[in-house]
Amino acid sequence: MTGDALKDALNDIIDDHTEYTYTTTGTDVWDILKETDKDTINTDNVILVYSGQSVDAAQEYNSGAGMD
């Protein structure tokens, strides 16, 4: 597919998705990242996508700096 047909097909795939905020008292992006990016060797940590470093998952928002 190309053009509008591709755009429409992709929209159909993602159209009925669930959005999560970055900070909330319920499930938020930080909770999800702790699971999806979990370090399998040290499960208290997450693996950072760009650096590959294993860092403490509890640092979460880190005063606006994120997991760095």
Image (tube, rainbow, N blue to C red):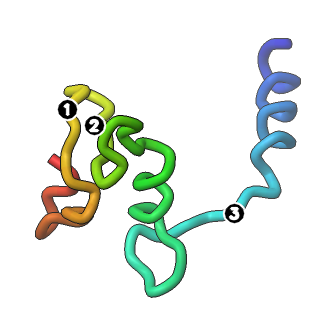
Tag 3 residue: 18
Q: Could you tell me the amino acid type at mark 3?
A: Thr
Question: In which quadrant is the N terminus drawn?
Answer: top right
Marks 1 and 2: CB-CB under 8 Å?
Answer: yes
Tag 2 residue: 48
Tell me residue 11's x, y (percent).
79, 41
Mark 3: secondary structure: loop
> Which residue lies at the image location 53% right of the left edge and 74% below the top edge?
27
- The CA distance from mark 1 to mark 3 is 29 Å
Q: Is residue 54 above or below residue 63?
A: above
**First in sequence: mark 1 vs mark 3:** 3
Q: Is residue 18 above or below residue 67?
A: below
Residue 23 falls in image quadrant: bottom left
Left or right of 6 in this view: 28 = left
- Checking the image for residue 53, the label placed there is 1
Left or right of 19 in this view: 54 = left
Marks 3, 2: nearer the viewer: 2
**First in sequence: mark 1 vs mark 2:** 2
Q: Could you tell me the amino acid type at mark 1?
A: Gln
> Which residue lies at the image location 87% right of the left edge and 24% below the top edge?
5
> Which residue lies at the image location 28% right of the left edge and 56% below the top edge?
57
